[in-house]
Amino acid sequence: MESNMREICINITRRCNLHCSYCYVSHLINKKNNNMKLDLSLEKIKGLVKLSSIDGVYLTGGEPFMHPDIREIINFFDNAGKKINIATNGFLIDSEMAEFLQHKNVTLLISIRDDFKKTAKIINLLNNFGVSVVCYHLPTTESPYIISQLLKECPSVNAIKLLYDSKNPKNSSEWFSLLYGIYCKLKSHINDINIYCEVAYLPKENVIAKDSRRGAFDNLHVSTEGLFYSCPLLVPNTEGKSDLPTQKCTPDLCPVLSKKLDDEKFTSVCCFLTASLENAIKVGKFGGAI
């Protein structure tokens, strides 16, 4: 594998203990891939990833902690000195797993759902073991309450990322309205917690909005079949490559940008572009969405 990219995202399993409507691979969950497998094996991962080409790895699924060899996969990258991010709902993490993670260079990216009470207990458990956590949340009208309550129950939380719903994308007015509701509720926490979000829209005169690729940047993603993609959102709709380079992401290929959600003042941009919540609110106000 030859690439200048420093982080690789690997979908290690299609197994999941939930079935979230907003998951971009929801139609693939718990279904065998083209190789008749639910998981990407560690041996396959070793053959795909050139460790000297990366600084870190992003493990996703499905639910990564359902992979039968999750500990061995974590050990493989940790022993190589790589930073490990794991996207998880956290429900399968107990004290034994937390103790294992305690000694690894791992950050858990834990999704916060409407039913966040159990998640809060897991976050506190992980904090007791010194495991790094970033909370991921897909905004709804209930988000101001959910996040404010989460912060009361989990005072250790110091980073929250707000995700744009790529499966059911909202227009600029709806999106900035959701962000503004969260901002108003959490104003008192802005200086204490890193709250950032996927921007999704920029004013039409912005240089990124004018660019032909709308800010799309070529990431490196590996599917459970062991195929390479430049963006995880391309997995359900395009054919992956068995070797690099991957097919570049363009507005026509992107399942979000191809919906042409532009309006009079805003242009839809790559939903993986992020900004602080405070700056996103400034963008919304500048464009008149707030």
Image (cartoon, helix red, strand yellow):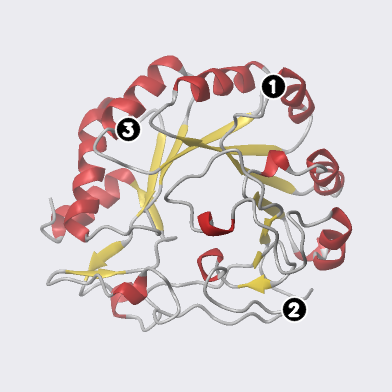
Characterize the local packing of mark 1: few (<14), some (14-19) or many (20 or more) Cα atoms within 10 angstroms: few
Q: Who comes first in sequence, dot 2 or dot 1?
A: 1
Is 275 positioned to the left or the right of 55 in the image? left
Label of residue 190 in the image:
3
Mark 1 element type? loop
Disc 1: which residue: 94
| Residue depicted at x 60% and y 38% | 17
Picture quadrant where residue 35 is located: bottom right
| Amino acid type, mark 2 | Ser
Name the residue that disc number 2 marks. Answer: 242
Q: Are marks 1 and 3 in contact (CB under 8 Å)?
A: no
> Disc 2 or disc 3, which is closer to the eye?
2
Between disc 1 and disc 3, whose residue precedes?
1
Distance from Cα at disc 2 to Cα at disc 1: 37 Å
Identify the residue at image location x=62%, y=31%: 132
Tags 2 and 3 touching, CB below 8 Å: no
Q: Quadrant of the N terminus?
A: bottom right
SS label for mark 2? loop
Find residue 10 and name its label: none
Q: CA distance from mark 1 to mark 3?
A: 31 Å
Location of residue 166 (image quadrant):
bottom left
**Image position of 180 (left or right of 104):** left
Query: Where residue 5 sits in the image (x, y, percent)?
Result: 66, 68
| Amino acid residing under circle 1 | Asp
- Residue 199: % across, % down: 33, 56
Please state the total of marks drawn on the protein image: 3
Judge left or right: residue 261 versus residue 134: left
Mark 2 neighbour class, 10 Å CA radius: few under 14, some 14 to 19, many 20 or more: some
* Sequence-first tag of 2 and 3: 3
Residue at 63% in and 43% down:
63
In three-dimensional space, the C-alpha distance between marks 2 and 3, rounded to whole angstroms, equals 44 Å
Who is closer to the viewer here, 127 or 88? 88
